[in-house]
Structures are given as structure tokens and as C-alpha cells.
Amino acid sequence: MFYSVSVFLRNQRSDGQRATFEEQILLIEADSEEQAKEKASSLCKQDCTSYRAADGVEVTTTIEGIERAFVITDPLQDGSEIFSRFLSYDEAISILRTKL
């Protein structure tokens, strides 16, 4: 079975500025939801590093958490649904506000 797994990574700057987050959606082949989450976590650990940003500040990336795993029931092809979630009104407006 295939799962799409939503993982949140935290990017923390050493200068004390508020952290930023990256959501990655990974396609994972696994026998169970739990195995899919474990595989996603293991893959994301490779992204957990420290580096110098363009402004010279050190940034450390860590896994904040696995948000969810979504089993993909459709055949993988052009237009297949690989991730879906319901959002409250406030969540949707918060996300969309940054796009408007």
C-alpha cells in the first residue's frame, strides 16, 4: 500500500527569531500506517542538519512531528488524490490569507 505522510520540520535560527516550519508530504510504501510514519520519520532525519543561512545565521532543522498518514486507495496516475484533509474555517483562512 502507498501512503502520503505529512511531516513538519522546524527551522530554528540561532539569532532568536521565531522558527519557521516546512510541511513535507512524502509518498511512502508500507504495510501499515504506523510503518509509513516510521519510514517517513527515518527519511526526514536526513534533512535534520544545521547550516548557515545567506545572512550568516546558523539554522538548525529538526522533526517537529508527523501530522498524519493518508492511505492512497486510488491507482497512482495523473490526477490521483494523494493527500486530503478537512480544515476548520479559521485554519483555511489562516493558510489562504498568506496567499491573497
Image: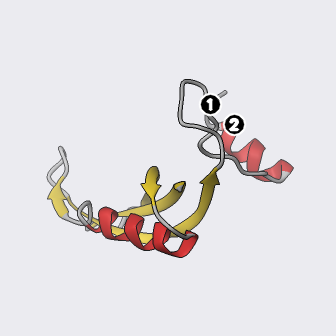
Which secondary structure, mark 2?
Answer: helix
Location of residue 50 by image quarter: bottom left
**Above or below 26: residue 18:** below
Pointers 2 and 1 in contact (CB under 8 A)?
A: yes
- Label 2 to label 1: alpha-carbon separation: 5 Å
Q: Is residue 20 above or below residue 14?
A: above
What coloring was used for the rendering?
secondary structure
Q: Name which residue lies at 47% across and 73% down.
A: 35
Q: Residue at x 71, y 46 (%)?
A: 94
Image side of residue 58 versus residue 70, left or right: left
The percent coordinates of residue 47 (x first, y second) are 26, 60
Disc number for residue 61: none
Q: Position of residue 52 (x, y in %)?
A: 14, 55
**Callout 2: few (<14), some (14-19), or many (20+) C-alpha neighbours within 10 Å?**
few
**Which quadrant: the C terminus?**
top right
Percent x, y of residue 10: 40, 64
- Disc 2: which residue: 96
Q: Residue at x 42, y 74 (%)?
A: 38
Toward the viewer: 29 or 97?
Answer: 29
Which residue position is annotated with label 1? 99
Given the current orientation, which residue lies at the most extreme top position?
A: 78
Look at the numbered disc 1 and give the secondary structure of its residue.
loop
Q: Is residue 18 visible?
A: no
Residue drawn at (59%, 37%) of the image: 75
Left or right: where 55 falls relative to 38: left
The kind of residue tagged 1 is: Lys
